[in-house]
Amino acid sequence: MARIGSTFNVWWSETMPVEKKFNPIPLVLAALAIFIYFFFWRVGEPAPDLARSAPIRAALESGDPQTWVAIGDSITAGTNSPFRYTDRVEEILRSRYPRARLEFQNAGVPGDTASGGLNRLERDVLSRNPDVVFVEFGWNDFKNGVKPEDFESDLSQLVGQLKAGGIPVIYLLTTTQVDVALANWKIKKRNAIIRDIAEENDCGLIDLYGYFALATQKGSSLDDLMSNDNIHPSGAGQEVIAQAIAHEFIP
């Protein structure tokens, strides 16, 4: 950027009359910063899909038993965090719905991929007859070099089996961001696949990547939200995930 500014100033000095000279570089940099902020980083909190969650909210309100299951990798398992987002969601929703009889079961397995989740779906999810299922995969697929088309196929099959198993409400979770630009670029590509699958199968979508970006807008840093390995959410990061999920069920 310094070289660009120097070249620009030389050109400006040679082409502008002396009495009209001024340094345009601060204005250029300010405009660039505004562009990046509004078009790349600004993320607003999404409105909950109240139509999708209406029957679940009614069950929570009335005290009908509810079994939820989250299937995923170490992020769901709560690696490097003092608690798991599933436990916090239970606490938040029981506070909001005093009559709720909610059990949010955790089927997170560290190191797992969408393919691994597909292989254990019957044992860890369908056999529990859940009312709601949350699916969180993508990080290990990305880290292990699984081709995007294979990830898409595995996740699509997993969602298809959930629907065939009669699961009434399914939510897909996007992958959280990290403090590495190249990794985030690849994560965004995987998240685009997750979004497409959610839309094609009429599943809910909880954009964890967006919620983490929103948290940083509000003053948190990624160092706060991530543990020391820069992969697994810290307790603060798990809290962001829990609040994002609970947000879908609180009008």
Image: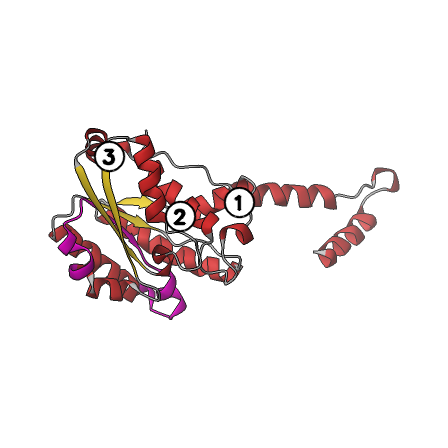
Depth check: 232 or 163 in front? 232
Q: What residue would you read off at disc 2?
A: 208
Say which element carries label 3.
loop
> How far separated are the C-alphas under marks 3 and 2?
25 Å
Rendered residue at 32%/31% (across/down)? 96
Look at the image and say whether residue 120 sits in the magenta stretch. no
> How far separated are the C-alphas under marks 2 and 1?
12 Å
Q: Earlier in the sequence, mark 3 or mark 1?
A: 3
Residue 92 place in picture, x, y as percent: 35, 37
Say which element carries label 1.
helix
The N terminus lies in quadrant: bottom right
Crowding near the residue tagged with mark 1, few <14, some 14–19, many ≥20 C-alpha atoms within 10 Å = some
Q: What residue would you read off at disc 1?
A: 216
In the image, the segment drawn in magenta is 122-148
Above or below, 225 against 19 in this view is below
Rendered residue at 54%/45% (across/down)? 220
The kind of residue on which mark 2 rests is Leu
The kind of residue on which mark 3 rests is Ala
Which numbered marker is on residue 102?
A: none
The kind of residue on which mark 1 rests is Thr
Residue 178 place in picture, x, y as percent: 49, 57
Q: Which of the two marks, 3 or 2, is nearer to us in this view? A: 3
Rendered residue at 42%/58% (across/down)? 187
> Is disc 3 in contact with disc 1, using a CB cutoff of under 8 Å?
no
Q: What residue would you read off at disc 3?
A: 100
Q: Does residue 209 appear in this view?
A: yes
The answer to which quarter of the image holds residue 245 is top left
Rendered residue at 73%/59% (across/down)? 3
Q: Which of the two marks, 3 or 1, is nearer to us in this view? A: 3
**Of all residues shown, which one is farthest toward the right?**
18
Look at the image and say whether residue 138 sits in the magenta stretch. yes
